[in-house]
Image: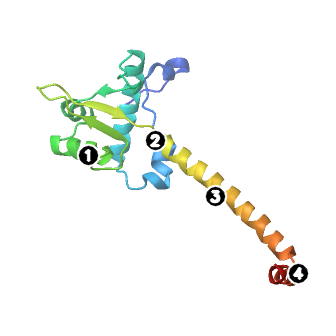
Amino acid sequence: MDFDYFYNREAERFNFLKVPDVLVDGEEFKGLSAEAIILYSMLLKRTGMSFKNNWVDKEGRVFIYFTVEEIMKRRNISKPTAIKTLDELDSKKGIGLIERVRLGLGKPNVIYVKDFMSVLAVKENNFKKSKNLTSEVKILTSEVKKMNFRKLKMLTLTI
């Protein structure tokens, strides 16, 4: 095949799939397969479109429709691979980046795509809390070192 070059602003005409770096490099996501990362990125993109179309449930959560057949076609994968990849992302069988809700009666499942950054925000918040606790322990430790325990013993004995 002989591909042509991009000239000037031609490079901007394509619609790209964004893959968050943290899904590739983050410790929390090390077990995810490349296929699951790509699928999650596709689901994220669809979530943006669903929000624009006001596909929001009663609780204000954005949902999408993305069938197994559509995944098979868009990713050029088999049905078992598509299901396995969804399971890898699912809250019941996998890491929890998506939640699937069956509607039944031949309707496609509703998919809630969860915010991958929320886990990192909680982790960061817990780190800040533990850092504050560590500094409080250091302050208390230095105050304990300054106390005169002999005077304290005498005070407790005289009471």
Image coords of residue 52 (percent x, y)? 42, 16
Callout 1–callout 3 Cβ contact below 8 Å? no
Type of residue at label 1? Asp
For the residue carrying disc 1, how many other residues have a C-alpha within 10 Å: few (<14), some (14-19), or many (20+)? some
Label annotation for residue 121? none
Mark 1 vs mark 2, CA separation in Å: 16 Å
Residue annotated with mark 4? 151
* Helix, strand or loop status at disc 1: helix
Residue 144 image point, x, y percent: 80, 73
Tell me which residue sits at (77%, 67%) in the image: 140
Decide: marks 1, 2 in contact (CB < 8 A)? no
Task: Say whether marks 4 and 2 touch (CB < 8 Å).
Answer: no
- To which residue does mark 1 refer? 87
The type of residue carrying mark 3 is Ser
* N-term mark: 4 or 3: 3
Q: Residue at x 27, y 42 (%)?
A: 86
Looking at the image, tell me whether mark 4 or mark 2 is earlier in sequence order. 2
Residue designated by label 3: 130
Kind of element beneath mark 3: helix
Mark toward the start of the polypeptide (1 vs 3): 1
* Mark nearer the viewer, 4 or 3: 4
85 is higher (above) or lower (below) than 52: below
For label 4, the SS is helix
- Residues under labels 4 and 2: Cα distance? 56 Å
